Amino acid sequence: MTTQKKLPVRATTMRRRVRLTAGVVGALAALSAAFVAPASAAPVTPTVPEPSIGDLIDSAGRILQELPIDQNGSGGYDLQSIFNLLVPQSPDQKTPQQQAVPTGDRRTSCTQVTQIGDSTSVGIDSASKVTDPADRLTAQFTRVGATDVVLDASGGRSIVEKVDGEPNAVDAVTAQLASGRRGCWVIAMGVNDAANIAVGSTVDADARIDRIMSKLTGLDVLWPTVMTSNPSNKAYAPDNMRKFNAALQRATTRYPNLKVYDFASETQDSWYVDGIHYNATGIVQRNRLFATALATAFPS
C-alpha cells in the first residue's frame, strides 16, 4: 500500500576485521584492564590520580572516533564491533556507530521535496521503524532546509512492473505531479528494477530511467544508487545492482537536471536485515545520507 506523509527488522551485526594503530591498542588495553584487572594488581601510587572507567572510555572513544570506517566492508575499522566487545550494549542504548551518523551544516535550495520509493522506503518516516523523530525522513530533509516533504513508497514497486495493481513508480510520479507537486525529487528506485531485468524483463535500465526522467523535465532530481548485501534471492545480487547504477551514471549525460548520489559506496553489510531491506541502523544512516546528499547536489 502506498505510504504518503506530509512534512512530514531485527538488526544483524556483522563484525569486521579491525586494524588498530599502536595508540589505539594502548587505549583499549587500558580500558580492558579497567574491567578485568585482577585483585592482586599492584596498587596505584597515591600521588598519581587513578583514572576512572569513564575517563578511560572517553579517552579511547576520542581516539577511535578519529579513525575512518571502511564503508565498503573491506576490513576497515568498525566502531560498533570494537565497543561491543568491550562494553555490552543495552537494547535501547545507541552504539558509537549509530551515533556517528553524518549531519553537517549543508543547506539545500529544495524547499519542496518528494521521495518516490519501494519497500526500502516504507516506514522510514514513522515510529514503527524509526524510534527517534529526529532520525525520520521528513526531519532529516527539514534539517537541510526543506519545508514541505512527501514520501510516496510502496512494497514491491518498480518503475515498470506493478504488484497487485498498486501504482508503479511512473504512476506515482504522475499522480504527485497531478496533485501539484514540483520542487525537488528523490527517486529511491532501482532495487526491484535490477532484479526484474535480471530475470528477463525486456525493458532495460536505461529505458526505465528514461520513463521517470521524461516526467520530471526541468525539475531537480536526486537519484541515489542502489545496493544489496548477499540476499538469498540471487536476482537481487549486488552485481545486478551495479548494472543499474551504471545506467544511472549514463543517464546524467542525457538529463542535466539529474544528480546521481553514490549511496551504494556508503552502505555496510551490517545495515541490512535480509540483504535487501534495512535494519534500524541502516534506515537512520540512509535517511541522513539522503538529506545531506540533497543539500550537496542542490545547495542553497
Image: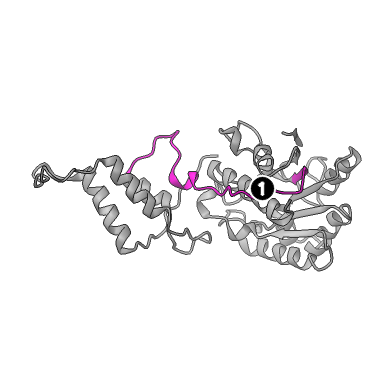
Decide whether the magenta segment is chiefly helix, strand or loop.
loop
Give the quadrant of residue 63. Answer: bottom left
Nearest the eye: 279 or 54: 54
> Is 106 contained in the magenta span?
yes
> Is 43 contained in the magenta span?
no
Residue type highlighted by circle 1: Ala
Residue 248 in the image: x percent, y percent? 75, 63
Q: Is residue 174 visible?
A: yes
- Write the residue at 39% across / 54% down: 64
Residue 28 in the image: x percent, y percent? 29, 53
In the rendered image of this protein, does residue 77 appear above or below residue 142? below
Within 10 angstroms of label 1, few (less than 14), some, or many (20 or more) residues?
A: many
- Write the residue at 33% across / 50% down: 60
Q: Write the start and end of the magenta stretch as one range.
A: 87-116
Residue 43 in the image: x percent, y percent? 9, 44
Give the quadrant of residue 259. Answer: bottom right
In the rendered image of this protein, does residue 218 appear above or below residue 156? below
Give the quadrant of residue 243. Answer: bottom right
Nearest the eye: 109 or 178: 109
Asked if residue 255 lies left or right of residue 65, the reply is right
Asked if residue 42 lies left or right of residue 175, the reply is left
The residue tagged 1 is 291
Check the image and name the residue furthest to the top: 127
| Quadrant where the N terminus is found in the figure | top right
Asked if residue 231 lies left or right of residue 192, the reply is left
Q: How is colour applied across the structure in the image?
A: one colour
Numbered disc 1: secondary structure: helix
Q: How many marks are shown on the rendered structure?
A: 1
- Write the residue at 61% across / 46% down: 288
Residue 149 in the image: x percent, y percent? 75, 38
Q: Is residue 1 visible?
A: no
